[in-house]
Amino acid sequence: MKNNKNIAKRAKNIKRIRLERERAIFMRLGSKIKAYFFTGILVTAPVSMTFYLAYKLISWIDVSVNKLIPLEFRPDSYLPYSIPGLGVVLLVLAMILIGMFAAGFLGKFFLSLGEWLVYKMPFVSSVYSLLKQVFQTFLSNKNNAFSQVVLLEYPRKDIWILGFVSSETKGEVKDRLGREMLNVFIPTTPNPTSGFLIFVPKEDTIDIDMTVEEGIKFVISGGLVTPDMAGKKKKQ
């Protein structure tokens, strides 16, 4: 009887150990599958979302451009099937032709006349002037919209924030402050196109090696995408 009890106990222990091993194997397998699943999302999601947004943007431009073209001149009316991106090509060609016309004598005349009329309108003139300056700043080949990324203490001591230097402070603001200042744009997360402008003494800012593009990515990601400083040091 005693031997039978020992055998039953031993069999029970062997069964328990086997079940624990099987459970551990399934848990390891489950954790690996979970890791592979999230790795798949990490690899495919950025690419898929990028292509999806690009497709949506191209489709929106195609539809918008087609609405501006008379029905008899639309490419879709005589082509066997719709060509994605054709509207983008037509838009680029139209911008090139408009630019060529605006660069000529007649184009400059009509452009000056149009601006003169716009500047005579009370509210519209302010909006037009602001938009023109913004587009000239961002699209100019001679100047970068932001020249440098800096760190500064804001809104109080020991609290640091990332800022983009647009230019040195000039004009009446500099004369009133009476010292060398920088125009620093403080972006908001995750939308860096919104933010606010502050004037900061140059000595109160800390220059960093981060590029403007890296700084924008850093802000958009909320600090998750950190620039690879190790790679920069190797290149240097």
Image (tube, grey):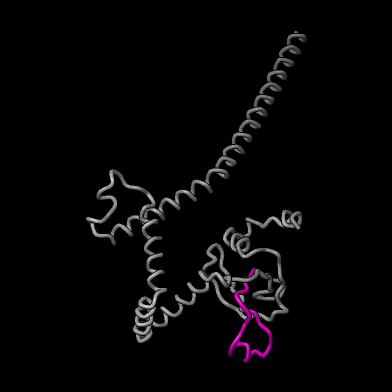
**Bounds of the magenta segment:** 161-182
Residue furthest to the front? 105
Q: Position of residue 105 (x, y in %)?
A: 38, 78
Residue 178 occupies quadrant: bottom right
The answer to whether residue 197 shows anywhere in this view is: yes
Q: Against 151, is 65 above or below?
A: above
Out of 137 and 53, give the one closest to the viewer: 137
* Quadrant placement of the C terminus: bottom right
What residue is at 39 percent from the left and 56 percent from the top?
89
- Looking at the image, can residue 123 be seen? no
Q: Is residue 47 above or below residue 22?
A: below
What residue sits 66% from the left and 82% below the top?
181
Of residues 224 and 174, the one nearer the viewer is: 174
Judge left or right: residue 41 versus residue 178: left
Residue 32 on the magenta segment: no
| Place of residue 165 in the rendered image (x, y in percent of width and height, measured from the top left) | 62, 73
Q: Position of residue 95 (x, y in %)?
A: 39, 65
Depth check, front residue: 9 or 87: 87
Q: Is residue 195 left or right of residue 92?
A: right
Where residue 186 appears, x then y in whole percent?
Answer: 59, 72
**Which residue is located at x 57 percent, y 45 percent?**
42
